Amino acid sequence: MEIITRNNYYYLHHTYKDSDIVKTKDLYLGKTIPKNIEKIKDDFLSQINNQTIFKKFDLIKKNYLKNWKKIPESVKKKLIEEKAVDFTYNTNAIEGSTITLDETRRLIHDKITPAKPFGDIMESMNHTTVFNDIMNNKFSDLSINLIKKWHLDIFKESKSDIAGIYRDYLVKVGNYLCPDWQDIPQLMKDFIKWYNKEKKKLHPVELAAKAHYRFVKIHPFGDGNGRITRLIMNFILHKYDYPILIIEYKKRQSYYHALNQADKKTEWEFLKYVYKRYFACNKEFLPSS
């Protein structure tokens, strides 16, 4: 997307694909570039996506639910267990856990404890419990108390001094200086207020991606923010009956890059990444091109 001029008037110009057909769309801005140009860009992209990308997301959901309905309950349970292993391994590995995928599977399925740090073991076990509770619909909706509960449940043994508690010190992640700790309570209230408002308007996949990015920008906890924000994203997807999205450890660099680009430009850079990964991970639910 770019800003162009025609006859001394400004326009937003966007080129995109719709069913393999390249299309362009322009939005008139006026004689000057509006001060809220970033919001206008986001709204413009949402409008275009409603007509193209979101239709494909809804087709994924339709075929996913159709397929899921056919699966026997006993098999569903095993599939959820395996998904829990996969999700737990990848999300913890991104944050530095030393436990491998096979070790995670043996730990969760067979209760065989690997010779690895105590913290990594407990975080894997506890994360799996939280994930299973999400998949089994044990939580009604997002709230500050629920987010704190997830953090407490995951880190209560490994990091008891910060588990379920907002940080009270400054944090810098790479070049990004996180918000002042004194602002966190209000920022989290604003986050939940935003979620409750936007869930009535945004497409669930867009809502999930935006919630991921906005939460991690707040960075409310001393550690574990990445794991919590990926749980938030997948809680939203599952709540609205869309298949979940696992951010793979082996592809973490593209994930980091998308977050960094969003910091430098707009959150659309992260949404693009999520949409691309979502299509790639769920291509079985789309017609072959």
Image: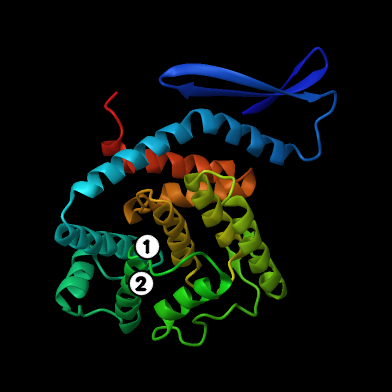
- Camera-nearest residue between 94 and 126: 126
Residue 204 lies, in percent from the top left, at 49, 47
Residue 238 lies, in percent from the top left, at 39, 55
Q: In screen coordinates, is 196 left or right of 277?
A: right
Amino acid at the residue labelled 1: Thr
Q: In screen coordinates, is 227 left or right of 98?
A: right
Label 2 secondary element = helix
Q: Which disc, if any, is residue 127?
A: 2
- Camera-nearest residue between 41 and 64: 64
- Camera-nearest residue between 199 and 111: 199
- Camera-nearest residue between 201 and 254: 201
Amino acid at the residue labelled 2: His
Residue tagged by mark 1? 91
Q: Quadrant of residue 67?
A: top left
Q: In screen coordinates, is 20 left or right of 288?
A: right
Q: Nearer the viewer, mark 1 or mark 2?
A: 2
Residue displayed at 41% across by 38% down: 57
Dot 1 and dot 2 residues touching (CB under 8 Å): yes
Residue displayed at 65% across by 73% down: 170
Q: Quadrant of residue 101?
A: bottom left
Q: Residue furthest right?
A: 31
Is residue 229 positioned above or below 167 on the image?
Answer: above
First in sequence: mark 1 or mark 2? 1
Q: Which disc, if any, is residue 249?
A: none
Q: Is residue 97 visible?
A: no
Image quarter hosting the N terminus: top right
Marks 1 and 2, how far apart at CA: 9 Å
Q: Is residue 92 visible?
A: yes
Residue 216 lies, in percent from the top left, at 55, 61
